[in-house]
């Protein structure tokens, strides 16, 4: 399997491609990373150093890959945070060029917009870009529950309303939706959190314990692993179970370390050989 991953890069810590690439490689995926920024660390620290790349830079890199024949045999294009129209247009251009060489390739987009606690934390330009131009072009999206509501103009809360929001998202463009950080009043307890995957005519729900941890980059790992597992097997329930198992172990190890950054390398066996401690339940 070959994935073109267009995301940010940091030297210290793990977000964007610095979170997604190694887990993908550890499960046997050939990854072609294209960076949108080259920062010292993620912006959650409040200060960072390093350059932002432009859409022209991204196009030049993708062109160079194309000239080497590297866009043939691509299974998926993966993207995360998009800082504005310049980068967004370059990513959409890359998707189009990949599909010219690899017609069966999918575009998997993590539509990074915000969360239920802080709301949208991206500029209006990015909100419009993601909702109006990127999501309609995507084959797979991995929003959290808040982002799903923003994209579809709905307020998903219960399982039923979340499924309805997913169906609305699928009418816009993407045929597969993974909803992360699902919190619904009818869940077993406040001590759990869920993910919901809808693919074809099936919907799968999985529940894991909620850990007292906010780890930057865990969503990037989730999107990457789910994309790879689903592309490999076409089985959304299995892809969801494998992804949840791997990411939970990663978060457990990070919490136990007492450190802020993901213990990405130390958790590598969880990607290659997930313990499958959680079972996905079909809900449709």
Image (tube, rainbow, N blue to C red):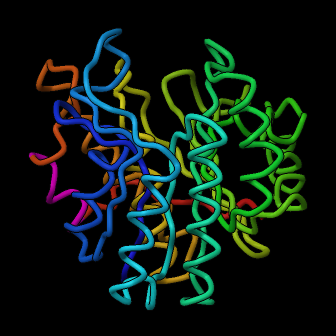
Based on the displayed image, in which of its 4 quarters is residue 41 positioned? top left
Query: 190 or 180, which is in the foreground?
Result: 180
Based on the displayed image, in which of its 4 quarters is residue 6 positioned? bottom left
Q: Position of residue 84 (x, y in %)?
A: 62, 36
Q: Position of residue 52 (x, y in %)?
A: 39, 34
Residue 233 horizontal side relative to residue 152, left or right: left
Residue 17 horizontal side relative to residue 187, left or right: left
Q: Quadrant of the N terminus?
A: bottom left
Q: Is residue 267 magenta?
A: yes
Q: Quadrant of the C terminus?
A: bottom right
At x 26%, y 28%, the residue is: 50
Q: Is residue 41 magenta?
A: no
At x 28%, y 31%, the residue is: 39
Q: Position of residue 176 (x, y in %)?
A: 69, 65
The correct choice, above or below, for 27 with respect to 184 in the image is below
Query: 9 or 145, which is in the foreground?
Result: 9
The correct choice, above or below, for 100 with respect to 131 in the image is below
At x 78%, y 51%, the residue is: 133
Residue 243 horizontal side relative to residue 157, left or right: left
Q: Position of residue 29 (x, y in %)?
A: 29, 75
The span picked out in magenta is 266-273
The correct choice, above or below, for 260 with respect to 195 in the image is above
């Amino acid at each position: 399997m070959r994935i073109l991953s267009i995301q940010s890069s940091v030297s210290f810590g793990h977000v964007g491609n610095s979170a997604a690439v190694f887990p993908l490689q550890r499960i046997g995926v050939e990854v072609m990373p294209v960076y949108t920024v080259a920062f010292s660390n993620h912006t959650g620290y409040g200060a960072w150093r390093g350059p932002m790349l432009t859409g022209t830079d991204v196009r030049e890199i993708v062109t160079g890959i194309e000239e080497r024949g590297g866009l043939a045999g691509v299974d998926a294009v993966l993207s995360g945070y998009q800082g504005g129209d310049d980068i967004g247009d370059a990513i959409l251009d890359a998707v189009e060029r990949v599909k010219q060489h690899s017609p069966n390739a999918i575009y998997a987009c993590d539509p990074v917009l915000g969360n239920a606690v802080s709301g949208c934390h991206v500029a209006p330009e990015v909100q419009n870009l993601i909702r109006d131009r990127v999501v309609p072009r995507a084959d797979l999206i991995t929003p959290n529950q808040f982002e799903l509501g923003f994209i579809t103009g709905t307020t998903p809360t219960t399982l039923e309303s979340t499924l309805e929001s997913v169906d609305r998202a699928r009418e816009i463009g993407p045929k597969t939706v993974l909803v992360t950080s699902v919190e619904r009043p009818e869940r077993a307890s406040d001590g759990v959190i869920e993910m919901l995957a809808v693919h074809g005519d099936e919907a799968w729900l999985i529940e894991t314990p909620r850990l007292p941890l906010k780890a930057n980059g865990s969503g990037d790992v989730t999107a990457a692993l789910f994309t790879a597992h689903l592309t490999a097997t076409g089985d959304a329930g299995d892809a969801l179970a494998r992804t949840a198992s791997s990411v939970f172990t990663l978060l457990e190890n990070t919490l136990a370390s007492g450190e802020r950054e993901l213990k990405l390398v130390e958790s590598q066996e969880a990607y290659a050989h997930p313990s499958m401690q959680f079972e996905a339940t079909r809900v449709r």
